[in-house]
Amino acid sequence: MLEKFVDPLPVMNTIQPFSAHKGSDYYEVTMKEGKQQLHRDLPPTSIWGYNGQIPGPTFKVKRNQTVRVLWKNELPEKHFLPIDTTVHGAGKNQPEVRTVVHLHGGATPDTSDGYPDAWFTKGFKETGPFFAGEVYTYPNRQQATTLWYHDHAIGITRLNIYAGLAGAYIIHDDEEEAMSLPAHPYDIPLVIMDRSFNKDGSLYYPSEPDPPVSEVRPSTVSTFFGETILVNGKVWPFLEVEPRRYRFRLINASNSRTYQLSLSNGKPFIQIGADQGLLSAPVHVSEILLAPAERADVIIDFSSAMGEYITIHNRAPAPFPTGSVPDPDTTGVLMQFRVIKTLQGQDMSRIPSTLRHVPRLKKRHAIQTRDLFLNMVHDQYGREMHLLNHQLWDDPITEMPRLGSSEVWNFINITEGSHPIHLHLVRFQVLDRQTIDKKIYQNEGRIIPTGPRIKPEPNEQGWKDTVCANPWEMTRIIVAFGPYTGLYVWHCHILEHEDYEMMRPYVVIR
């Protein structure tokens, strides 16, 4: 087993624009293969990264500052991870290595959103049917928040992200900066991934489920959980900190793994933000639940912890919520803080009692309520295939909300696992969750609530773009659709589910 806490936590470099023109900053980012040492005792690992690094460089932009990015694919023409050509979009008639970039949580025109069929190959030699142009435009007309960018190519998203194609994207604004929250160098993104390795240091990803499928090889798997945890591209790193307040932007970039995080010294996280920006007020929480793609913006106060070594623990079962409890020596640990650095001047940061006004969306203003099932069937080979509302990716579009309207989407999860549901373009609020009678549904097909509607916890009451829908529950969200019309997608963010039909297009119409 690899030794823990022997590598310092890397802090990703901030990418700088190539040029500025007519009020917008222009960037170029190259997806390429590289070698990166992910642990002291591992040989350098072959990865695919934005600018050749895992995670990719961090974007730091200002609100209302338009950004244009040329994403260049300079990857090899053959994938080093196992492609299942029975998965829709990954057939033998398609180029093996395809990429398209999605700014997760970005309010972005559909031509720059990273639609799964808008893929492109090396040097733009081949492009997908919805490819709209080489340069993406990000208007950044959003409140200060922590977003992330990652690959979204249909049929191979799970492989491309597992290979390393992910990075942090942070929007700042004047209102947030006036709050005197911990700032650079005490404001650090933590991009969390789980990975497994072969003995030669190469990334391991299964080519078959267990038990194997005799007719298909390689074959897609229903979920995948790595044996080690990486933070910012290092396995179980440590960070030496000063006795002061730090801000950490937690990003769950894992394929399937949910995390339930706590600090070994029993002190709370002070959560100040969720997926789509600051909460209305700070929330002290002993644990943070982070499903794939969710983010949490937290402050940890080390001011009275001089000399302590503090570990971030994880106790979320995998798969969540009914799977195996993590091993406390491996996947039950993320990283360690060592409060051993000398304080560099007085800590002038503060934690305001109020952060940002979060207006509540009203159910009475919603023009439609949609009941949307999260269900599972078995394919022709007996494999699990998870679906949204009993539909495949290629079925006719059924969700066509109007620009400027609000709708309630009620996710009815009739499977045995949680599904983190992500809607592109929009932000939303969680209304409530309510359990349903499993036996009545299985015997009669009727949805009967069995408990009260439970409001979300205070740290889930801000703006969201991904919500954890638990098994045999209804999870209601309210969504205001905008600011653009066009073609987008909604999907489960367990990447193995998303790649194998648990994704649907939707259209915002006028």
Image (tube, rainbow, N blue to C red):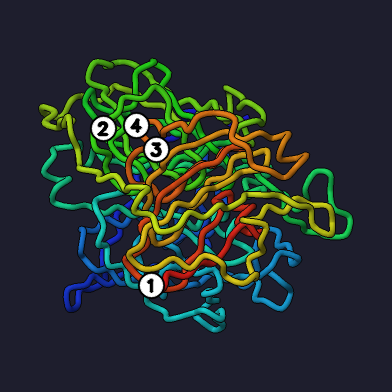
Q: Nearer the viewer, residue 140 or 408?
A: 408
Which element type, helix, strand or loop, lies under badge 2? strand
Mark 4 or 3: the one toward you: 4
Q: CA distance from mark 2 to mark 1?
A: 39 Å
Pointer 3: residues within 10 angstroms few (<14), some, or many (20+)? many
Residue for badge 3? 9
Which element type, helix, strand or loop, lies under badge 4? helix
If you read the primary sequence from the N terminus, does the residue marked by circle 4 or circle 1 appear first?
A: 4
Asked whether residue 175 is in view, the answer is yes
If you read the primary sequence from the N terminus, does the residue marked by circle 1 or circle 3 appear first?
A: 3
Pointer 2: residues within 10 angstroms few (<14), some, or many (20+)? many
Pointer 1: residues within 10 angstroms few (<14), some, or many (20+)? some
Q: Are marks 1 and 3 in contact (CB under 8 Å)?
A: no
Say above or below: 425 vs 293: below
Say above or below: 398 vs 476: below
Amino acid, disc 2: Tyr
Q: Is residue 505 left or right of residue 102?
A: right
Q: Quadrant of residue 443?
A: top right
Provide residue 113's location: percent of width, then percent of height. Answer: 42, 68
If you read the primary sequence from the N terminus, does the residue marked by circle 4 or circle 3 appear first?
A: 3
Residue for badge 4? 458
Mark 2 or 3: the one toward you: 2
Residue for badge 2? 246
Q: Which mark is residue 226?
A: none
Q: CA distance from mark 4 to mark 2?
A: 21 Å
Amino acid, disc 3: Leu
